[in-house]
Image (tube, rainbow, N blue to C red):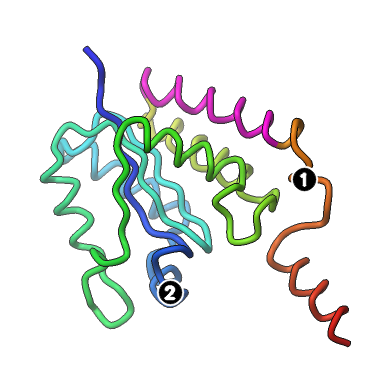
Amino acid sequence: MARELLAVGLSHHTAPVEVRERMALDEKSVRERLDRLREEGAVEEAILLSTCNRVELYAVPTDMRAIEAFMREQRGPGGEPIDQYLYWHRDVEAVRHLFRVASSLDSQVIGEPQILGQVKDAIRIASESRSIGRTLDKLTRQTMSVAKRVRTETRIGENRVGIGNAGVDLALQIF
């Protein structure tokens, strides 16, 4: 039986910096939320990616209502619901989204190298939390392969990239 795959989150494409800052999670909070999602029966497997530009849950859901309720609990800086900032991808679109994220094709500065390390960290945390099963294990292995292939077969990683470097380059051009 095929399992459904879900990707739900917010990023620099959908949410202002104040909301992203409010939603960002440290490693301990990621572990706690993964545990809670599993304990409440919302997910069979899950990875929670939290960076300065995105917070995303990749999951094999078992109870969509529980996931929706979990997401509705999250609040923006003024206590407002974050629903308006969320995107929901399922199955092939969820896979495509994770591939684009890990390959830095969905980054604020396309080609920045940090995101792949952040995805690896999220996978490690989920693995240590015993939140990765057969489906996400296969997906994460394929994701790493795709991300490495994008970097080696394209020119995406040749130049100095990253938001800090982009700012320095812009300042040098201006001054």
**Looking at the image, residue 80 lies above or below residue 30:** below
Q: Amino acid at mark 1?
A: Gly
**Looking at the image, residue 154 lies above or below residue 162:** above
Residue 44 in picture, x, y percent from top left: 25, 29
Closest to the observer, 27 or 139: 139
Quick one: label 1, few (<14), some, or many (20+) residues within 10 Å? some
Q: Quarter holding the C terminus? A: bottom right
Q: Which residues are magenta?
A: 133-150
Q: Amino acid at mark 2?
A: Pro
Determine the CA span between mark 1 and mark 2: 27 Å
Quick one: label 2, few (<14), some, or many (20+) residues within 10 Å? some
Horizontal side of residue 92 vs 13, given as left or right: left
Closest to the observer, 147 or 135: 147
Horizontal side of residue 124 vs 174, given as left or right: left
**Looking at the image, residue 163 lies above or below residue 119:** below
Decide whether the magenta segment is chiefly helix, strand or loop: helix
Residue 16, which numbered label? 2
Upstream in sequence: badge 1 or badge 2: 2
- On whether residue 142 falls in the magenta region, the answer is yes
The residue identified by callout 1 is: 157
Residue 127 in picture, x, y percent from top left: 45, 30
Which residue of the protein is positioned furthest toward the bottom in this rendering?
175
Residue 11 in picture, x, y percent from top left: 44, 60
- On whether residue 29 falls in the magenta region, the answer is no
Q: Please report the residue visible at 75 percent of the width from the left and 31 percent of the height from the top.
A: 153
Which element type, helix, strand or loop, lies under badge 2?
A: loop
Q: Please report the residue visible at 11 percent of the width from the left and 45 percent of the height from the top.
A: 65
Q: Please report the residue visible at 19 percent of the width from the left and 62 percent of the height from the top.
A: 73
